[in-house]
């Protein structure tokens, strides 16, 4: 609600939509985090889990 004189105007819907660069950056960041998590899991001697399957799916779709 709001709309007081000291409040900034509501952003346009266009500014709330992620662009292609934003999506690519998010995908790259997710892949990097999953790879890091995978390496840490291997170092700790943990077994494979659902996040490893997610990384596999990401790599297949690359």
Image (tube, rainbow, N blue to C red):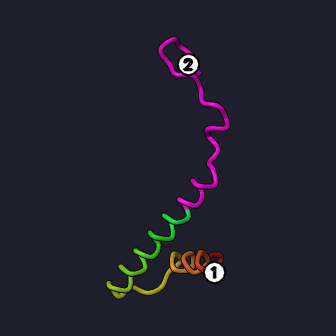
Magenta stretch holds residue 27: no
Q: Say which mark, if any, is on residue 3.
A: none
Instruction: Name the outermost residue toward the front.
Output: 21
Residue bounds of the magenta highlight: 1-26
- Image coordinates of residue 57 in percent, x first then y, are 61, 78
Q: Quadrant of residue 9?
A: top right
State the residue in front, 25 or 55: 25
Mark 2 packing: few (<14 Cα in 10 Å), some, or many (20+)? few
**Residue at image coords 60%, 30%:** 11
Tell which circle, 2 or 1, labels the residue nearer the N-terminal end.
2
Q: Nearer the viewer, mark 2 or mark 1?
A: 1
In this rendering, is residue 13 above or below 56? above
**Residue at image coords 62%, 40%:** 16
- Image coordinates of residue 32 in percent, x first then y, are 46, 70
Contact flag, marks 2 and 1 (Cβ < 8 Å): no
Q: Quadrant of residue 60?
A: bottom right
Q: How many marks?
A: 2
- Left or right? Give the position of 53 relative to 45: right
Quarter that holds the N terminus: top right
Magenta stretch holds residue 18: yes
Mark 1 packing: few (<14 Cα in 10 Å), some, or many (20+)? few
In this rendering, is residue 27 above or below 38? above
Give the residue pinned by disc 1: 60
State the residue in front, 12 or 55: 12
- Image coordinates of residue 55 in percent, x first then y, are 54, 77
Q: What is the distance, in whole Å, between disc 2 and disc 1 at their CAs? A: 47 Å
**Residue at image coords 45%, 76%:** 35
Give the residue pinned by disc 2: 2
- Image coordinates of residue 14 in percent, x first then y, are 67, 38
């Amino acid at each position: 609600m709001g709309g007081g004189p000291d409040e900034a105007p509501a952003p346009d819907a266009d500014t709330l939509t992620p662009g292609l660069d934003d999506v690519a950056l998010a995908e790259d960041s997710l892949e990097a985090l999953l790879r890091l998590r995978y390496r840490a899991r291997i170092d700790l001697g943990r077994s494979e889990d659902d996040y490893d399957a997610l990384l596999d799916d990401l790599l297949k779709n690359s």
